[in-house]
Amino acid sequence: MRKRIVAGNWKMNKTYEEALSLVSEIDNMVKDEVNGDVTVIVAPPFPFLQGVGKLTQGNDLMHLAAQNVSEHESGAFTGEVSAGMLKSVGVQYVIIGHSERRMYHHEDAQTLYKKLKAAIAQGITPIFCCGEPLDERDADRHFDYVGKQLHDSLSYLSNEEFDKVVVAYEPIWAIGTGRTASSQQAQEMHAYIREQLSRMFDAEAAFNCSILYGGSCNPGNAKELFSQPDVDGGLIGGASLKSRDFTDIIKSF
Ligand code: PEP
């Protein structure tokens, strides 16, 4: 069964106090206003994971994600955080392959594959991000670009491993720019992604995979995006830092 998911990627924002206030506000609004058919995920920075997780523990709709994970299990990797460490503080999801990590930290397809394996081995659900830069879309190569990203990192997973994966389509030109993909652009890419997944894995697994849209999603455009048949929710950046906006996006289903 495909899950409807709204995940907030807080990126490198907020102090600890601010993070606790934000998650308390979201938690209260979700309890009061959201029906039970959506998985809500918050992805705070590493040092806030445990504190934020404690505040969401009593709310079945709320889940905790990390923004990154090491591909290694343990050892001399200064500054890195393993999947086992994340698991031990209650992390259930992890964002892998965000365009900012691909771009600024040079994470390549093989590294992302190893991160996927490391997360899955610990029972943490990866949210695997893909999406094309503007020049690829302008040159009408966006399907091939995204297809290659999927193939190069996901295709080595077994069917059983892939069953755990959530995919997020995030066109780079829409991230943090205020320029959203139209619902038609999102739907056609999500349908393409699902078709590619059905070639790599069994058809049922592809059908059941939640595919999220990310890129300047806000309370004004979420309803139309989420109403598309292959858009199963959103990965939200800027708007996830405001409890009212984030909750209104969650309520857009
Ligand atoms: C993101 O970075 O994952 C994202 C979707 O950001 P924004 O919503 O701010 O475009």
Image (cartoon, rainbow, N blue to C red):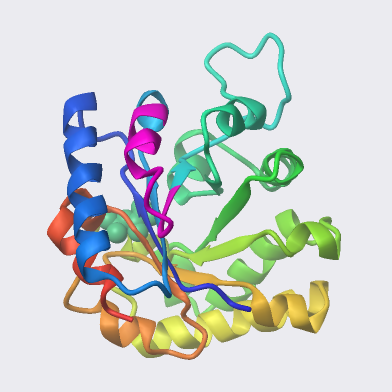
Q: Position of residue 19 (x, y in %)?
A: 23, 35
Q: Is residue 56 magenta?
A: yes
> Is 34 placed above or below 87 here?
below
**Extent of the magenta region:** 50-63
Q: Position of residue 125 (x, y in %)?
A: 62, 51
Quadrant of the frame with the N terminus: bottom right
Question: Does 132 sit left or right of 165 as displayed?
Answer: left
Quadrant of the frame with the C terminus: bottom left
- Where is ligand 1, by quadrant? bottom left
The residue at 47%/44% (across/down) is 65
Along the line of sight, the residue nearer the viewer: 66 or 100: 66
Along the line of sight, the residue nearer the viewer: 35 or 109: 35
The residue at 56%/72% (across/down) is 210
> Is 22 placed above or below 171 here?
above
Question: Does 11 sit left or right of 168 as displayed?
Answer: left
Is residue 68 in view?
A: yes
